[in-house]
Image (spheres, rainbow, N blue to C red):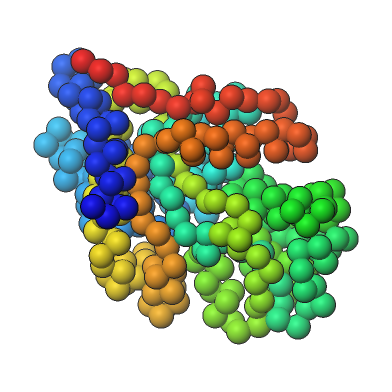
Amino acid sequence: MTTTRRRVAALLVALGAGLATATGAAAQAAPREFRIGYQKVGVVVVARQQGTIEKRLAPQGIAVRWVEFQAGPPLLEALNAGSLDFGFAGDTPPVFAQAAGSTLVYVGASVLSGEGEAIVVKAGSPIRTVADLKGRTVAVGRGTSSHNLLVTALEKAGLSVSDVKPAYLLPSDAGPAFANGSVEAWVIWDPYLALAQAQNDTRILTTSRQTHAVSDFFLASRTFADRYPGIVTAAVEGMAEAASWAEAHRDQVAQALATVTGVPYAIEKGVADRTEFGVGPVTEALLAKQQATADRFHRLGLIPRAIQVRDAVWTPPRT
C-alpha cells in the first residue's frame, strides 16, 4: 500500500465516525453554503478543480464557496470571525491564532515537500549562508510558515530573530521589495518561490526540508465542527481524495495550478513535481512538531502566552 493510500485509510478510520452524524440534528440544520478559505497552492487547488467536496455535499443541498487569501494569517482571522467555515494554512498561523484566543480547531493535516519553501537572496548577493543574514533586512510574512522557517534557520545558525531586521510583508509587497533591493533576503513559499527562481537571479540559502519538517493543516471553528461534523469530515475526505489523485497526475495538477494562479505551466510543473500530496489525521508526531513550534515562538516572545496545541485538536463525535 502506498504512503498516500495509507494516509487516506488512516483518515477514514479516524474520521469515519463523524460521517455517521451527518444525519440527525446536524444534517437537519445544515447550512445552505459551505465557505472554504484557500491559497493558490497544493491539494486545495486540486480539490477545487476536481470538485471533490462539492460532490460530497451536493446531496445535502449545500453549495461550496471558495474564498482566496494570500497567506494563512488573514485566512484564519476570517475563519475565527465567522466569515469562513473551513480553511487551510501552514504550521505557524494556527499557533498565533490559538495564542490570541481563537476557537479554531485542527481537523486534518497535509504534509508537503519542504523544497517548496525557502530563504532566498539575489544571485550576486554577498550573503552566502544563513549566518550571513545577521544585520540584514529579511522580508517574511508575520505568523506564516515562512516565519517559522526563518526563526528555526537562524537558531540553527546560532542567531536569533533579533539579529536580523524583519520586514513583515505579505507576498504582494515582499516580491516587489525583493526585486528592487529594498530587502536583502526573502522567506517565501510556492508559487511565489518558483516565480522568484524563474527570474534566474535568485539563490536559495536553505529550504524547509533542510531546516525543519513542514506541515499544513485544515481548520474549522470549534462551534462549526461540533455542530456540523459530517460536513467537516466530508471536506477533509474530499481533500484526501484530491491528494490521492494528485500523486498520480502531476501534469494535470500543474495545469490546474496554472489555470488558477495565472503562473505559466512550466513553472507550476516544477511546483507540482516537488510537492508531496498527502492528507491524513493530526497524528501524535505532528502534534509534537506543532508544540515545538508553539514553544519556540513563546520563548522568543512572538506569541503572548504559552499554549497547548493538543487543546485545539478536534475529534469527531462517535455515535
Q: Residue furthest front?
A: 1
Quadrant position of residue 24: top left
Nearer-the-camera pick, 106 or 57? 106
Tell me the residue at 15%/35% (across/down): 61
Using the image, determine if residue 185 lies above or below residue 166. below
Where is residue 269? Give x, y as percent.
39, 74
Nearer-the-camera pick, 221 or 248? 248
Q: Residue furthest left?
A: 59
Quadrant position of residue 231: top left
Using residue 138 as the reference point, say whether residue 258 is left or right of it: left
Q: Is residue 106 visible?
A: yes
Using residue 173 as the reference point, say whether residue 111 is left or right of it: left
Where is residue 60? Give x, y as percent.
15, 32
Q: Is residue 48 visible?
A: no
Using residue 266 as the reference point, say whether residue 318 is left or right of it: left
Where is residue 65? Give x, y as percent.
31, 44
Q: Quadrant of the C terminus?
A: top left
